[in-house]
Image: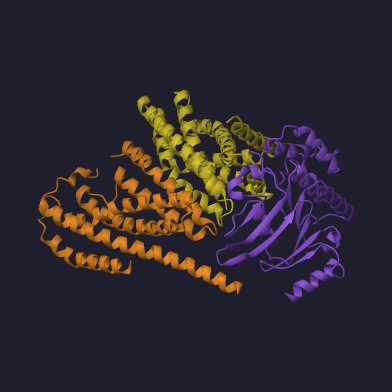
Amino acid sequence: MTVDFTRLGVHDLGRSFGRRRALARVSFACEAGEIVGLLGPNGAGKSTLLSILATLLKPTTGHVQYGERTADVAGAALRARLGMLGHDLYLYPELTARENLLFFARLYGLADAEARVAHGLEKAQLAERADDQVAGFSRGMRQRLALERALVHGPRLLLLDEPFTGLDQASAASLVARLRGLRDDGCLVIVATHDLDVVDGLLTRVLYLRQGKLVAEEPGEGGGGALWERYQRVISHS
Amino acid sequence: MRKYLHLALGVAAVVFATAPFAIHWAPYEVTMGLVQKIFYFHVPSAILTLVWALVCGVASAIFLFRKSKYADYVAVASAEMVVLLGSMMLVSGPLWGRKAWGVWWTWDPRLTSSLMLWITFLAYLLLRRFGGPGSDKLGAGMALFGMANVPFIYVSVNYWRTLHPQTTVIPNLVPPMAGPLWFAMLGFLVFSLVLVTLRAQLEEQRDRVEALYLAADES
Amino acid sequence: MTDFFRIAWLIVKKDLTVEIRSLELVLTTVFFAALCVLVFAFAFVEEGRALDHAAGGILWIAIAFSGTLALGRTFERERQAETLRALLLAPADRPALYVGKLLGVILLMLLVQVLIVPLVGLFFQAPIFRHPGLLGALLLTGTIGYAAVGTLFAAMLVRARSRDVMLPILLYPIAVPVIIAGVRGTAAIFQATPDEPMARFWITLLLFFDVVFVTLALWTFEPLMTE
């Protein structure tokens, strides 16, 4: 069974851990070809939301629709279409860059694993260091490799948790360019970030989260001023 | 529901009030004398330990595969009952053993497997208390494994050591002794049923309070 | 089905590669197991001679303790960069992930035994070469059973608080039959006049234990691993 979708619908999503509410009644929808930004202070529920979208966490209320389906129904076939880059990078430090990518490519059961891995290493600008252990990589190199790891199976929905942390300006700019390319290829990208200057102009839509609630939703551009000015306005007024 | 609980509590109270007399009037056993009277206390707690352990295992399986919250409440409540009744069994048993075999404790199959069952459920309660979020699920797995383990422990200890009176004692009991035994059993059963029901309800209420706190947070 | 074993083998191969590069688990676990044997030697050797039947008990306690250590470290490693989440995110069969991790743990534990069995033979004058087949079968079936329960518990405890202390608390009560069978079976082999039927009985019991608990673990792994 293959599952594909172009639309993501989030309905009334909530998640609590004991008495702590991490996410409350969040609803929104987005389409393939969008780059959605999740903005908000620490503890706003961004990571929880991403975990739920990645099917790693079950919501306590509400549900997520991937096209026509929900995670309960589609299961493994749906996970084959999701890519996630977490705050922790999901890489084995003892393995080389190539081994890391190959392991995950094979885990996803990809037929042309070697070719995809070579392509990924190229994109991460790590072709020369491909056979070095990840333990010796800088944060920026790991981050680029981790992105390719999340993309190795060509996911439809890409979830990024703070992908710009530890990147220098050049790497950040190339990541931005990479995300634009993915969007043009029909990928739906959702990115949670604090680096407002970097993503200004990249996002097609902005969701502001605060204390687990969706407090505002804006188009990516326009609406008066730079992104950080709008962020200040929304977060302090809600 | 409440009405039945009151009724059951009444029955248990009557049994516990009258059972001492029934036990007192029951004939003295020839070899054991007075110590044999422990039997009316020890056997019901031992049998019900096993029954509640089974209930906990089944409830845990239901919780794990059907995701029924109520099954989880029942599992916690019955696990606590296992530890409570198991403690009674483990305290009263050695009193008997001292007289019958001359030692407080012996590594006989039944004793050892009861001890291990009790320890498994202590571990379960520790997990529920200190495991943090998600420990309800982990506990269900533990209870399920503990359940599957009972026959293995029994067989292995059986081949390792063997003194406990065989279970055939109970069906062959003379009526004057069997009467008080079953009477005591009824008391234990009804009372533990009341406790488990109340405990499961408490757990449900606690969940509801949590939900209310969350709802209050939201508005 | 072939996909199932392909995934499991992929995990084993990955774990082996990581382990060969770092040797962390092998070296620390082996050293720890050897220390266990030594410490018990101080307790149970009197006037230069070991107490009767001490050898089997010490061997299995060392296996159980070092096994707990290996289990904890194996999953700590998957937790460090949250790679366990990446594994769960893959469209692979979840029970296949379990089998892969299980095989890795079994391999590690067997490797430890290769060292500590001769050590026990040396320190306690245990006749380890008397029935190598029976002893091997006993160690293998015991290890599989212990690791089957341990791998599931260690995996589900990855996210739990105080997981270091919780693993032995949960694992040892369930592993009691393995310990009894292992110790008694080994004693039956080591005693002055070996009792082969007894050793075979314990191996059969362990086989049943393995079948029941591997099945149960495969069955419960999926619901236990979803948060």
**Between B110 and A39, which is closer to the camera in this rendering?**
A39
Which chain comes out orange in the rendered image?
A: B
Q: Residue at x 61, y 45 (%)?
A: A74
Q: Colour of chain A?
A: purple
- Hue of chain C? yellow
The residue most toward the bottom is: A237
Q: For the point 55% across and 64% down, which residue is it?
A: A18
Q: Position of residue C50 (x, y in %)?
A: 43, 36
Q: Residue A167 versus residue B94: which sits nearer the camera?
A: A167
Provide residue A138's location: percent of width, then percent of height: 81, 49
User: To which quarter of the image does residue B203 belong?
Assistant: bottom left
> Against A214, is B151 above or below?
above
> Is C216 left or right of C162, judged from the image as shown?
left
Q: State which quarter of the image contains the N terminus of chain C.
A: top right
Name the colour scheme: by chain
Q: Position of residue C206 (x, y in %)?
A: 42, 34
Taking the image as shown, residue C158 lies to the left or right of residue B205, namely right
Q: Percent position (x, y) of residue C92?
A: 63, 39
Q: Is residue B35 visible?
A: no
Residue situated in front as seen by the camera: C66 or B205: B205
Seen at 79% across and 33% down, the residue is A115
Say whether residue A49 is left or right of residue C157: right
